[in-house]
Image: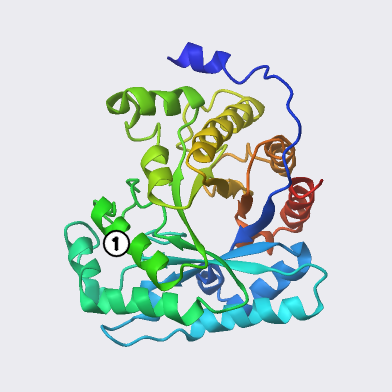
Amino acid sequence: MLAAALLLGSEAPSTPTPPAPLVGFSYSPVFSQWIESNPNSDLRELLAATNPDLVRLPIYLDDVEPSPGYLDFSSVDQLLGVVAEHNLTASRTTRVILTIGARNFTYPELHMPDWAGPRAQPWIGIVQASDAYRQYFDTSLQRYRSSPLMYAWQVENEALDYVVNPSTGDDQISATQMAWEIGEAHRLDPAHRVVTTTFDGWNVLVDWFQQVAPALATARGYSGHPAATLTAGDALGLDIYLDGPSTPFRFTSIALRTSLKAEAIRYWAGLAKAQNKEIWLTEMQAQPWSDSDGTFTTQDLVQSAATYRHEPLSVVLLWGAETWLLFPDWMNAAASALAILRAP
């Protein structure tokens, strides 16, 4: 299987360059809080430096509903205010993708308040069936659905994937809960699409095996759940990383891994098109992994952007924006990558 996979990703027939995607980045206030910075001023600086089409922002359950029935959206409102202020003078209007749900992006992935109990199933499901959780969910949709900044909703983050970290146990969101949340988003805000996300396997061959022999392809570490995730929402968001401690077959070059990921994007784009849906790259690696040996460089970021520009993506969001503020070379590389991705 490995030998066959490595043979893939070499030469592919040339095709016309697809239309440019909307591009931007994900931003979480958590990192700014960790380093005792100001989330609003940090977002303001990132917007000014990159002038994105889109920015993905979280509506964290533990932040918005610190106690059952008490809702405080002030932190989200402030971030949206920063985006609105940026748009007053920017040459390009920035819109937002708001992510809601117990699973949300940035460590520890499961953003559950203390009142919710143990950070694992079945307690997650019990909390999500509660009136308090549904108040958080519905009020979020109703509060922001009319905002002129809204581009789309993301429901949960990598909901069907098992995320391993020391602070959570079995943290997958049930298919039944996902169906309710997506249905609720469609019911309360039919004007905006819903994207669902998953991490992707390291090679298109694994993705193909997932289609024809799922028992062989869903082994932890090899594949997420792109097929089920695509079926669930209006757009499939793939989270793709080229280098890190858990990267399968890391002995290969980053250039080869980039080519393999591009083939996976192309594969799922074809399946998405057949369902009249879009394919997004919701997390494109744009920083070195925190405990890697530094093998992912700024040049790798720029070159991966050049490769992905030829794939039929509707949206591309870079991952790692919070750290760019500390490293000017990565900020410059991110700006270059965004320029390449949006080039005609």
Question: In screen coordinates, is 15 left or right of 323?
Answer: right
Please give the name of the residue rendered at 62% of the width and 74% of the height, measured from the top-left corner. Answer: 149
Q: Nearer the viewer, residue 128 or 227?
A: 227
Please give the name of the residue rendered at 76% of the width and 70% of the height, measured from the top-left corner. Answer: 48
Q: Nearer the viewer, residue 32 or 126?
A: 126
Residue indicated by mark 1:
180
Image quarter of the N terminus? top left
Location of residue 151 with respect to 285 vertically, above or below = below
Q: Nearer the viewer, residue 191 or 290?
A: 191
How busy is the neighbourhood of tag 1: few (under 14 within 10 Å), some, or many (20 plus)?
few
* Rendered location of residue 210, percent (x, y): 37, 28
Secondary structure, mark 1, is helix
Whether residue 196 is visible: yes
Location of residue 333 with respect to 7 vertically, above or below = below
Please give the name of the residue rendered at 67% of the width and 19% of the height, measured from the top-left corner. Answer: 12
Task: Check the image and tell me how it is coloured.
Answer: rainbow
Location of residue 229 with respect to 10 vertically, above or below = below
Please give the name of the residue rendered at 46% of the width and 82% of the height, measured from the top-left corner. Answer: 143
* Rendered location of residue 79, percent (x, y): 58, 78
Location of residue 320 with respect to 49 vertically, above or below = above
* Rendered location of residue 183, percent (x, y): 35, 62
Whether residue 167 is visible: no
Residue 128 position by quadrant: bottom left
- Marker count (numbered): 1
Question: In screen coordinates, is 73 left or right of 130?
Answer: right
Question: In screen coordinates, is 195 left or right of 101?
Answer: right
Q: Amino acid at mark 1?
A: Trp
* Rendered location of residue 230, percent (x, y): 43, 44
Residue 13 position by quadrant: top right
